[in-house]
Amino acid sequence: MNLSSELIDLIYDVPLGNSHWVDVLLKLRDEFQAGLVLMYLLPANSAPVIFATEPADDSIWDTYNQHFYRLDPWKQAIDLQQANVMLPGEEMLNYSEYKKSSFYNDYWQDMGFKYTAGGRIKTKTTECMLGFPRLTCMPAYSEFEIRQMNFYVSHIKRALLLDGITGHSLPSHFYQTALSSEYGLSAAESSLAMALIKEESLIQASHQLGRSYNTSKTQLASIFKKTHTHSQMGLIKKLLQK
């Protein structure tokens, strides 16, 4: 399989703060000869965030957000698919029926797109949709290209999880919300758990958060109980599981 080590490095540079998801999407667009690559982040209890190879203020998004988002059959199809698996559009939609839709005739076709591939990426941090529309002049994605895409997505999933913790491209509340939802942690406990991932000790985490050591110690005991862990190392390993 012909894979780009430069692209993989770029993916993991995002949680380190050395690149951004838009840089990754631009590289993916070139790698797969797509007309556009889109990452639509859907965090729990907060507004969606769009990263794309086209600027956020481009008219393509105005038209989409104002009207066609509600009609988008790709979003509806991806919602039904297994998470963390990219599929060609032909496996997600009935193309003959799709070409009769308002979305295809009044938007997709006008944008110059035809075939696509995409899927849903889900981590403890957040959930997102990733799409690779191709221009009309390009063929459908091959089985080989879909395998390549899925390889990169496995790395994107890991980097998204880490990025939710470091907060370089994603708002830090993405990961806090996920921890609260999954383990029943309070906001204070979630922020302490994140601080413990970044800091070397409970004392340093307490200092970073502006809390007393005794307060953090009490909160940590509650975190251990709720996450069924017994040590800071065990807690960190559990939180960083894929």
Image (cartoon, grey):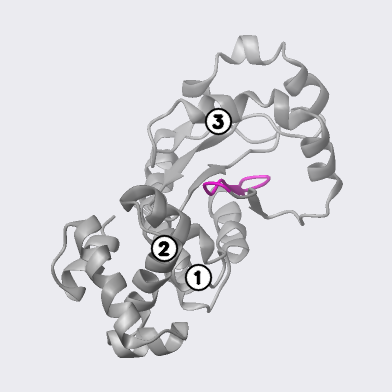
Sequence-earlier tag: 3 or 2 = 3
Sequence-earlier tag: 1 or 2 = 1
The residue that mark 2 highlights is: 159
The disc at residue 14 is: 1
The residue that mark 3 highlights is: 140
**Amino acid residing under circle 1:** Val
Res 27 → quadrant: bottom right
Identify the residue at horizontal 20%, vertical 60% (top origin): 225
Identify the residue at horizontal 16%, vertical 68% (top origin): 234
Q: Residue 3, relative to residue 87: is it above or below?
A: below
- The magenta-colored residue range is 33-45
**Amino acid residing under circle 2:** Ala
Residue 66 location (% of width, % of height): 82, 35
**Amino acid residing under circle 3:** Ala
Q: Is residue 35 magenta?
A: yes
Residue 15 in sight here: yes
**Element at badge 1?**
helix
Is 42 positioned to the left or the right of 51 in the image? left
Residue 9 location (% of width, % of height): 43, 71
Identify the residue at horizontal 41%, vertical 90% (top origin): 207
Q: Is residue 87 magenta?
A: no
Is 170 positioned to the left or the right of 112 in the image? left
Q: Dot 1: within a 10 Å radius of its alpha carbon, few (fewer than 14), some, or many (20 or more) residues? A: many
Measure the alpha-carbon separation of dots 1 and 3.
Answer: 30 Å
Q: Nearer the viewer, mark 1 or mark 3?
A: 1
